[in-house]
Image (tube, rainbow, N blue to C red):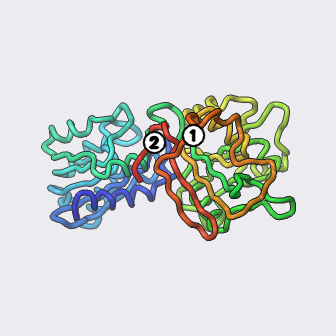
Amino acid sequence: MNDSEYMRRALYLAELGLGLTSPNPPVGAVIVKEGKELGGGWHRAAGQPHAEVEALKDVMTRHGPDVTKGATIYVTLEPCSTHGRTGPCTQELVKAGIKRVVIGAGDPNPAHEGKAAGILSEAGIEVVEGIEEARCEELIRGFAKVQRTGLPWVIIKSALSLDGKITRAEGEGPWLSSGGSRAEVQELRGEVDAILSSGQTVRADNPRFTIRSGHEREGKVQPWRVILTSREKGLPREAEILSDAFADRTMVYTGQRIECVLRELVSDHGVVTVMVEAGGRLVGRLLDEGWGDEVVFYLAPLLTGGSIPASGGEGVFDLAQRVRLVRVEYRRIEDDVRLRGTLAGTGGEFER
């Protein structure tokens, strides 16, 4: 195996931490010696050991304390070099006798950014950077945006008909998308820190916005349920989000600017990634004001008509101002087509 192949193994481990590590990024690490993979690890939660330390512990448990001497470690994110809730990983790698460190992406945290290579090189360790860099950067896109702007990565999710509507006729039930698409939404909820919606959606649909039974993951708490509403209209007390077992995971913001809410979610609650599940009015406003970063749309093979679009708002005045997607993926899920892409200009235009 070459460096890219081992880094892809580290990426696989890092993905196990998606949705579990905020406000930290998901990171994976693999240790190799003489062409043999000895073990690996991933960051499991904020305050717990980083991926490099988990990998060292795994290898030492399996093979003994001296086997890491002369080994290579592949890590998806530049090792940290300062003391925080845990010690610096650069120091642990030096102590373990690692002789080669292969790094996927640089750390966007200014406290660490670009410092590991110099520290490790001074200790006689060979450093290779930029292996599978685009994939490693995509994995931490939420964390990178927080470091860069103080705002979370915002994913807009919607299920819509071929004519761009999000509702069915009264009495037909609320679902447009297939069971497979709805199951995937549960997985997406497991990867985000908060779900953002509107008071209008709560009053109309009484949603739960929870990770359903069968889709839970060890260590994952239910995402925050963040509701934006106007001063004139409160939420019914019997609403699921106010009365269920996770009522303490619900936050209602009345008459506040979207930017203020997003920044507070980051600063006060450690939120890195938000998924929007709302009607066309809020989705349109988010797009008009430029708060979205990514979209996940489930297109159902239906023509429904009706007055509620998937995206409302003021819209654009000409095609030159249109919202454009890059790195678009299409996937068939039962009879639906899922479209997933990044909004151009967000700084998150990664290779997939």
Find residue 196 and report its image quarter.
top right
Compared across the picture, whether 175 is left or right of 65 comes to: right
**Residue situated in front as seen by the camera: 155 or 215:** 155
Most extreme residue toward the left is 124
Label 2: few (<14), some or many (≥20) within 10 Å? many
Can see residue 178?
yes
Give above or below for 158 relative to 35: above
Residue 42 image offset from top left, x and y in percent: 38, 55
Q: Tell me the crowding category of disc 1: few under 14, some 14 to 19, or many 20 or more residues within 10 angstroms, Cα based.
A: some
Image quadrant holding the C terminus, namely bottom left
Whole-number angstrom distance, CA of label 2 to CA of label 1: 15 Å
Q: Nearer the viewer, residue 3 or 308?
A: 308
Going by the numbered disc 1, the residue's amino acid type is Val
In the rendered structure, are the residues bearing label 2 and label 1 in contact, judged by CB atoms less than 8 Å apart?
no
Q: Position of residue 111 (x, y in %)?
A: 35, 32
Is residue 346 shown above or below 218? above
Q: Earlier in the sequence, mark 2 or mark 1?
A: 1
Q: Secondary structure at mark 2?
A: loop
Q: Is residue 107 left or right of residue 128?
A: right
Q: Which mark is residue 41?
A: none
Residue 97 is at least partly visible in this image: no
Residue pictured at 73% horizontal, 52% vertical: 165
Q: Which residue is mark 2?
A: 348
Residue 38 placement (x, y as % from top left)? 25, 65
Three-letter amino acid code at the position of disc 2 = Gly
Q: Which residue is mark 1?
A: 323
